[in-house]
Image (cartoon, rainbow, N blue to C red):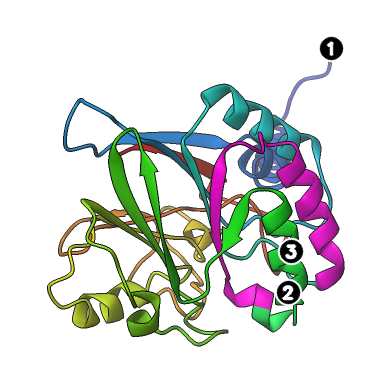
Amino acid sequence: MKKLTRRKFIKTGILATIGLVLLDSLWFEKYLIDWNYFDISKSEKNKIRIIQISDLHLDQLRYFHKSIAKKINSMKPDLIFITGDSVDKTEKIEHLNLFLELIDNSIKKYAITGNWEYWGNVNLEELKSVYSKNNCELLINENRNVSIRDRDITIIGIDDLIGGNPDFGKATENLKDTETNIVLSHCPEQRDIIAKQKGNLNIDLVLSGHTHGGQITFLGIVPFKPQGSGRYLKGWYKDSEPKMYISKGIGTSILPIRFGARAEVVEMEI
């Protein structure tokens, strides 16, 4: 048996480390989804279960997309929120349709635009049509009221901050007085604008995406955050109202890797 020299030991260790990093960034953090659960309900009665899906960046239907859909169906949520950047080209809408068809059509869904729907010149009418056939409404500066288990909830969908024309005033026109108001806004920086414009309107939750949690981070260092992130990165922000959760999302953009920012789906009870 050959003696393992110090040089060979170091070389083997370096190669093994590189291999593990590549495995993590190209497979583990992209395809093994982190399912995060939060209970933010105000009462133990009549809880409503929601799922947030963000930043799909679909280019084809993969095995892990099927796994996501299967798990969502088993969870039987009351509502699904899709917070932007689902596709970046019109021709990719067909892949989004295949994914949505895997999810129980009886589950009501609401979606908003992200920057890539605009940067990729996605046909929004075609996108809206595909969403609609899958029991999903695309909200662009609009609001909807839904009643579930004797509770009235308002969903406010804001157009994308950097690609679209966000208009909080228009989005809250003819707003009904309900006990729970949820805002869907792709870019988390929009929260600062909403805080100034909301007046006396009580907003219980803002759901955002966009940042991918940094997508590539090193020991907490984030080399790059996209425009529209502001001072935000991922997870909860409760330092001031309205409180916001930023999903790290599912897909990737620019580089097809994740490191220190595992893909996630969010489940909440409200």
Does the magenta run of residues contain 108? yes
Quadrant of the image for the C terminus?
top left
Residue closer to the observer: 43 or 143: 143
The answer to whether residue 78 is seen in the rendering is yes
Q: Which amino acid, mark 2? A: Glu
Q: Find residue 86 and report its horizontal and vertical position in percent.
A: 66, 61
The residue to which callout 2 is attached is 125
Left or right: 21 as drawn, with respect to 122: left
Estimate the spatial distance between the alpha carbons at disc 1 and disc 2, rounded to whole Å. 68 Å
Q: Which residues are magenta?
A: 90-117
Residue at the spot x=68%, y=39% of the render? 31
Q: For the residues labelled 1 and 2, say whether their Cβ atoms are less than 8 Å apart.
A: no
Q: Secondary structure at mark 1?
A: loop
Could you tell me if the residues under marks 3 and 2 are in contact, i.e. CB atoms within 8 Å? yes
Task: Provide the secondary structure element on which disc 3 rests.
Answer: helix
Disc tally is 3
Circle 1 is placed at which residue position?
Answer: 1
Depth check, mark 1 against mark 2: the one in front is 2
Mark 3 sits on what residue? 129
Query: Is residue 55 in the magenta section?
Result: no
* Residue 7 visible within the image: no
